[in-house]
Image (cartoon, helix red, strand yellow):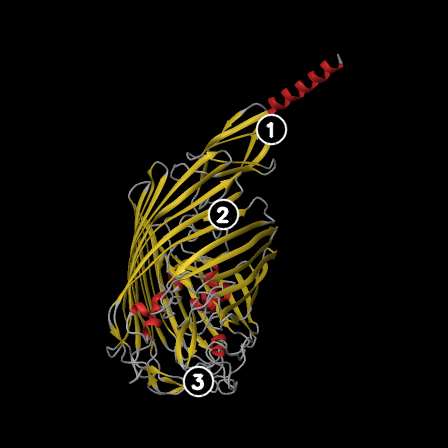
Amino acid sequence: MKIFLLLSAIFTISFTASAQKSIITGRINDNQGLPISFASISISELKVGEVADQQGVYTLSVISGRYTVKVSAVGYKTTEQDIVLIAGETLHTDFTLVQDSDLDEVVVSASRKKETLDEVPSSINIIGLKSLSVQKTINNNLSEILANTVPGLGFNTNRTSNLGQTLRGRGILVMIDGVPQSTPLRNGMRDIRSIDPLAIERVEVIKGATAIYGNGADGGLINYITKKPNVSKAISGQTSIGSTGFLSKPDQTFGGYIGQQFTGKIKKFDYVVSGRFENTGVSRDAKGRVLSPEYGLNELDMWNVFAKVGYDININNRVEVMYNYFTSKQNTDYVAQAGQYGNANLPTIGVPGDRPGLAEGTPYNHNLYIHYNSERIIGETDLDVTLYLQHFYTLLSSSNFFEGNGQPGNLSKKKGLRINLNTPFVVSDNWNGNFVYGLDVLSDVISTILTDGRVSVPEMDMRNLAPYLQVKSVFMQNLIFKAGARFENINVDVPTYTTLATRNYVTGGYSGGGIVVKGDAINYNALIFNAGLRYNKLSYFKPFVSFSQSYSLGDLGLVLRSAKENTVKELTTKAIIANNYEVGFSSTFGKLNIEAATYVSTSELGASYVFVDGKAQIARSPETIYGFELAADYAVLDNLSLGGSYSYTEGKREINDKKVYLGGDRIGPPKTTAYVSYSPLSDWTLRLQMLSAGNRKRFDPVNGKYSYGTGPMDSFTTFSFFSNYNLDKNSSIQLGVENVFNKDYFTVPSQWMADNLSYVKGNGARFTLSYLYKF
């Protein structure tokens, strides 16, 4: 009898609990009424959640009560709704999510589809529109903007060139909307400054070796995502006007800019059109001396014209055309007066004089793409097709490097096609994911021609055909596994050419010219892999681990320029495969956010610039680079926040069974950043930020002298200031002051280059005052 009563009680309790269960079901749609596949729906009070199916349909079974339901999906604003569930009831509730392409936690560059940072098993930095607005008011140079905001990226050079500004000690692939700007076959190092920030919506920085976009991303990639239209009005926009100058001895330093942007949507068409012109004055150091014009940012004329037009064919199909033109040329009345390396009182400065040759800089950078997107073109598969062109021409300094003097210019002509498909899959309630696959086709013809017609590097005609596949699997909603492969098939045709005599920096004479090198085709093939795992269930600890590879041809142009052999086949032109191993995590504790990562990058055959007997060469030897990064932000109050970062990188290469440190052109000193932002009034924001370089002294002088890349780097710290005051809902005044305390220091490259002519100080206190009107 007792057993019977016990079983009856258990049955009664179980029946009562079952009777109290309620069901909530429905569909999750976008604002056009289309279902959102695999959206997440959860009830935090019960710690339960579900992922919608391919048709956006969801079902949750919970006990009765009053709850807040949260619905989210990649690329959409999260929504919450209060519901009341009665015991045994089935409640049908549909949700509508609004697209939000401005979310800082959404990234597209890592795998060619929208996904949140929590889904990506690697280190990523997003510089959004708000951060860009602050940084470009302090200094509009993208090289400096990225140095101030991206841990692991090298220090700003304060030059038109981004020489030495590596990412984790390796080269970077720079893109505009996925269109490559870099020219790794003959690296002129002008790719970071290839567009004006006015045309940029956000910057996505993917760290670590990656092959998903092809040649050149040994250290990672930087993707400039251009402005998106405001579709809420037929016409809106903004006007900006400003002035720049130096506070120490300001005469001749004043410059100015004006920018205009229009955007809107009319029926099925949407558009963004903008233009900006800036002229910079003379640049001075903290003591008022004119900075060297050699690759300098002095007296530049810069234009940027940008246009993007989209047409919604129907709900699922869209076509978009983008064009961007950028030019930056130096027109100065100064020439460089060489200083004395190591003597802080004798830096290289600018003195009045006529600079030889044509205006140095980037005469033009044209980018054009046509992008077609089709959602659910076959079943649940989405299709993206991009056809692009890029023509880039940059002029270097006229010098005595070539016998008879000469001014080299790098010319690159790219044509490409990208076909990208995305197919989701569902195996079970606890296992879903997607396949991203497609084909990249690229033609890049690049050469170095002197303005007098002589050929330094002949036309290298590279053709690349690369199929790829990436797989993402989501287990139990919070465990993400990603893996993929890309097959590189690259052919480079090199014509027969004759080398030019170049200067020997030891003897002062010229040698190496007159060698006829027979042309040939160089073929490369490789299968590159990546894999990663991330767990994002716990907000206070979201760890990841990853392995990734990159494939790069290196600076083949420099090899050809320095050739001593008679045929291309005799040259050392093997490609570089970099292996990146990384472990990291992100954490959120209330208003405190923390990110950290440590990494090791290896390559059996690296490529480092070295000088042998006074001649620039590329050393091919095994390399190992390692380091770590830490960043944190904390909202102390609603109107007060602070944060900072620290990054450390070190690297060595093997020579004759001996390990030696990599030079300063690859490995920079430790970098520390910090900021505090305060709003004393609702319409007034103030920010003070710091950039600090540590010491790096890894080499001893040889015969009393340091060679290229081995110069010791001393520490320095600079502060910059930003203020924004909203006059009304449409207009604001902004003030930025770079190096606000007028610190006297040498830039990082001027120290490791160990060269008299390159021994240049950084900017003194420099202001930007601007007025912005939005309508």
Q: Is 140 left or right of 366, judged from the image as shown?
A: right
**Res 289 label:** none
Front residue (pair 737, 734): 737
Residue 74, percent from left and from top? 46, 45
- Dot 3: element: strand
**Res 349 label:** 3
Name the residue rendered at 59%, 61% in the picture: 642
Residue 581, percent from left and from top? 51, 56
Residue 23, percent from left and from top? 54, 27
Name the residue rendered at 51%, 64% in the picture: 625
Please give the residue where the numbered disc 2 appears in the rendered image.
119
Q: N-terminal of the two: label 1 or label 2?
A: 1
Q: Nearer the viewer, mark 1 or mark 2?
A: 2
Q: Nearer the viewer, mark 1 or mark 3?
A: 3
Please give the residue where the numbered disc 1 appears in the rendered image.
63
- Dot 1: element: strand
Check if mark 1's residue and mark 3's residue have beta carbons within 8 Å. no
Q: Could you classify mark 3 by the number of other residues whose Cα lies within 10 Å: few (under 14), some (14-19), or many (20 or more)?
A: many
Identify the amino acid type marked 3: Ile
How much space separates mark 2 and mark 3, taking CA atoms? 49 Å
Corner quadrant of residue 214: bottom left
Corner quadrant of residue 27: top left
Q: Is 125 left or right of 46, judged from the image as shown?
A: left
